[in-house]
Image: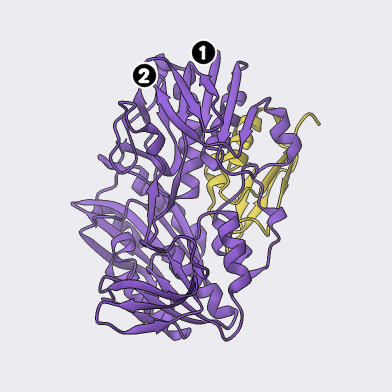
Amino acid sequence: MNRVLIVGASAGGLITAEALRRAGYRGALTLVGDEPHPPYDRPPLSKQILTGEWEPGRLPLRRDDDIEALGLDLRLGVAATGLDVAGRAVELADGARVPYDGLVVATGVRSRRLPGSEGVTGIHTLRTLDDALTLKDRLRPGRRLVIVGAGFVGAEVAAVARGLGVAVTMLEAGPVPMAQAVGEQAGRFLAQVHRDHGVDLRTGAAVREVVGAGGAVSGVRLGDGTVLPADDVLVAIGSVPNTGWLEGSGLPLADGLVCDEFSAAAPGVYGAGDVARWHNPLFGTAMRLEHRTNAAEQGMAVARNLLSPEARRPFAPVPYFWSDQYDMKIQAYGHLRGHDEAVVVDGDIAQRRFLLAYRTDERLTGVLSVGMPPKTLRAWRAMIAAGAAWAHAVSTAAARP
Amino acid sequence: MKVIVDEAKCCGAGQCVLIAPEVFDQRDEDGIVVLLEPEPAEDRHSAVREAAAVCPGAAIQLAEGS
């Protein structure tokens, strides 16, 4: 292994590169990213950057000299356009062809858009630093923001915008926001919190189109014909994996790059971060996570497996995510999607301080906390990692003082 | 090795405590990082580097070689 190529220069790609060097890899290491910025942190985009609390200068994931010390062939502002698996080379938008012995696909995701929204002033998505700075400039007291989609990005922006005095309407297609991600109880709780902060949250809302005049947005037309006037519209309806450059390569693609339990998609080809759909043996299911922590953990696992093909280890993490909304910190461990039951095992939802445990079949598969001391989650995380039986986990919790 | 933590960047995930519990802890009330050993012994360097790498807030900086 003398030439490793990492495509994608965000958290997953950078951390893979660092882990390779820490493990003693001294060969050529190329890191390619389509954004012009050095690797930066995305979670603050919908939080501290949007509030103005942080300047963009705080976002780089590493200091310049730390990046320098990695000895990278760093190619920023250039996208990958194609992959030749048999010839072991990646084609770049600038015409370069980069050969490799080992390839890491870490191209992440992009925001899903509404048709007809390209180039219309006032229609936003939020994925990149440039997106965040554009939106930040538009959030001023008294302006009207319509957020299409009440997932975590939409909800975090709603919280920031309310704090800045913006009138916010948030539209959710389903009956309960975030229900798929965190279940109905937590979703109903979050819906109430947003309403209490003055968000006009409309569930069961179908968006027919964005309306505008003279190249600027003026509102959103709903399925029933109602037009909600807006100065700005944030489209936050999920993400699409950046796998266009892999089409025709023969690598398996299905809402992401399909990887096995080692995070491998083909011999010498691995996936890391938001783009990778891999088999997590801890939960016995394929998953693709858009969580900052997973990008780091998967990057480290990929580096290890790439360098030690004879001693590969399955990537079997307990997923973790957090979200900041108003004065609340939401933290979750495990695989909450597709759960059968969620039960409050500590605290009280009415007090906005609680811990929910999630059951899938007869196992504890996740926990979510709001307003609880973060340390209390550790014992739960350990039980999830150990595959604890639901009955055991819940009775253990009940026995705690 | 010297360890520097940025409390303002810390998001309270506690990943560092899972990886290097001798070096990092969390405040009880809000989970913000507490640095137990600013100059950890050599046998802990590998775990500390891993904790710094995986920190979701990029809140752990290392000054190596000292």
Q: Amino acid at mark 1?
A: Met
Q: Is residue A353 visible?
A: no
- Judge left or right: residue B15 versus residue A237: right
Mark 1, secondary structure of its residue: loop
Q: Quadrant of the C terminus of chain A?
A: bottom left
Q: Residue at x 40, y 14 (%)?
A: A310
Residue A236 found in image quarter:
bottom left
Contact between labelled residues 2 and 1, with CB atoms less than 8 Å apart: no
Q: Colour of chain B?
A: yellow
Whether residue A397 is situated above or below residue A89 in the rendered picture: below
Residue closest to the far left: A361
Measured Cα–Cα span from mark 1 to mark 2: 13 Å
Q: Position of residue B22 (x, y in %)?
A: 62, 41
The purple-tinted chain is A
Q: Is residue A193 visible?
A: yes
Q: Position of residue A171 (x, y in %)?
A: 36, 75
Foreground residue among B36 and A185? A185
Foreground residue among A342 and A106? A106
* Label 1 Cα crowd, 10 Å radius (few <14 / some 14-19 / many 20+): few
Instruction: Name the residue beneath numbered marker 2.
Output: A267
- Earlier sequence position, callout 1 versus callout 2: 1
Instruction: Name the residue beneath numbered marker 1.
Output: A1
Q: Amino acid at mark 2?
A: Pro
Residue closest to the far right: B66
The total number of labels drawn is 2
Whether residue A74 is situated above or below residue A198 in the rendered picture: above
Q: Position of residue A106 (x, y in %)?
A: 47, 36
Q: Position of residue A4 (x, y in %)?
A: 53, 21
Residue B38 found in image quarter:
top right
Q: Chain of mark 1?
A: A
Which numbered marker is on residue B35?
A: none
Mark 2, secondary structure of its residue: loop
